[in-house]
Image (spheres, rainbow, N blue to C red):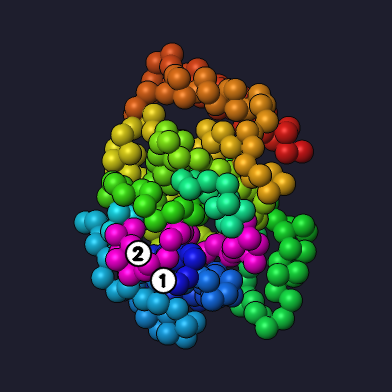
Amino acid sequence: MSTLAIFTAPKPFTDAHINTIQRNAIHSWAALGDQVEVWLQGDEPGIAKAAKELGVQHIKDVARNAQGTPLVSAMLAAARASSEAPVLAVVNADIILLPETLPVLEQVRGQAEQFVLMGQRYDLQVKDSLDFNGNWVGQLQAEIQRAGLLHPQGGSDYFIFPRHLYNRVPDFAIGRAGWDNWMIHEAVTQPWLAVDATSALPIIHQTHDYAHLPQGRAHYRVAETDENTRLAGGMRHIYTLLDVNLELRAGKMRAKRPNLARSVRRVERWLQPDERAGTGWRWALLRRLRRLRRHLLRVEES
C-alpha cells in the first residue's frame, strides 16, 4: 500500500503554458516513487489525456459549484473513496514537489499521529518542460537561488495530513482564495499539530497569469472568493501561516520563534470583523496594522 496519495483538480490543459507547468508539477509528484499515488480530479479538457500519458490516476466525476468549479469537500471525499493511503495531500496543480517530500513526511509521522503540514512556496518563472531524465532537481534549486521569490505567508498551496482529518469541510471552490486559509484555521484550532514546513520542504510555484478566471482577475478578486469566505465563517476564520505556532526545524517540530510580525498579526486577529472589507475605526486600524506587518516581514526577510 502507498504511503501518500496526492490529489489535485487541474485547470484545462488547453493553454500551452498551463499545459507545460501542470505536466511539470504532476511529473514531479510521480517522480517521488512507488510510495506515492497521484490522482487528477475533474473532467476539464486534457485531464484524461495527461493522466494517461503521465501514468497517474484520474477521477472524472467531482461535484462542482454553480460556476463549474470543483469543490474541496468533494475532492476529499473522492480521494478517500479511491485510495487507501494513510496520508493524503491536496496540492495545487502548478506546484513542483522535490524529493525531500517523503523524508519530511516520515520525520513528522514519527513524532505525531495528528498533524497537518503546510508552508510557503517559492515563486519561479518556468517556461519550458523539465527534463526528468536529467538533473532537474539541481537545476531548479539553482534557479530558486538565482530568481526564486519566497511568497508571503498569506496561505498554503499544499496540505499533507492523515486521512482521518478534515472529515467535515465546507463546499469551498478550489483555486479561489479562502479555502486554504480555513484549512489553516482548522488545523490550528483543532487538537492537531499544525506545522509550517517551509524551511524543511521547499516547494516551487510556477508563475502564471489568471486568464482562466473571469476578466483575468486574480483568484482573490472573484465572487467565488467571497463565497469561500462566507463558508469559512467570515474573516475571523481566515488564518495565515503567521497564525501557525509550530515549524519543522532540524527534523523536529518546534515552537516558532517569536517576532514582531506575528505579534502584530495576533492583534489583527483580535480586531478582525467577519466581513472582508468595511469602514470605521476598526478597519482603519487594521489597515495600518497590516502595512506594519508587511514592513516587518520585509525587514525580517532582507
Check disc 1: other Cα within 10 Å, few if <14, some if 14-19, many if 20+: many
In this rendering, position of residue 205 left or right of residue 79: right
Image-quadrant location for residue 201: bottom right
Residue 191: x %, y % from top left: 43, 36
Q: Which residue is painted at 55% across and 43% down in the image?
A: 195
**Closer to the camera in the image, 239 or 127:** 239
Which amino acid is tagged 2?
Ala
**Quadrant assignment for the C terminus:** top right
Image-quadrant location for residue 69: bottom left
Q: Which residue is mark 2?
A: 79
Task: In the rendered structure, find residue 39 and report the number of the disc placed on it.
Answer: 1
Asked whether 85 falls inside the magenta stretch, the response is yes
Say if mark 1 contacts mark 2, CB within 8 Å.
Answer: yes
Q: Which residue is painted at 42% across and 23% down in the image?
A: 272
Asked whether 53 falls inside the magenta stretch, the response is no
Q: Which residue is painted at 71% across and 66% down in the image?
A: 140
**Closer to the camera in the image, 124 or 166:** 166
| Distance between mark 1 and mark 2 Cα atoms | 8 Å
From what the image shows, is residue 204 above or below residue 227? below
Q: Secondary structure at mark 2?
A: helix
Residue range corresponding to the magenta coloring? 76-104
Q: Does residue 101 show up?
A: no
Q: Does residue 275 show up?
A: yes
Residue 94: x %, y % from top left: 52, 64
Q: Which residue is painted at 29% across and 38% down in the image?
A: 230
Sequence order check, earlier mark of 1 and 2: 1
**Closer to the camera in the image, 298 or 202:** 202
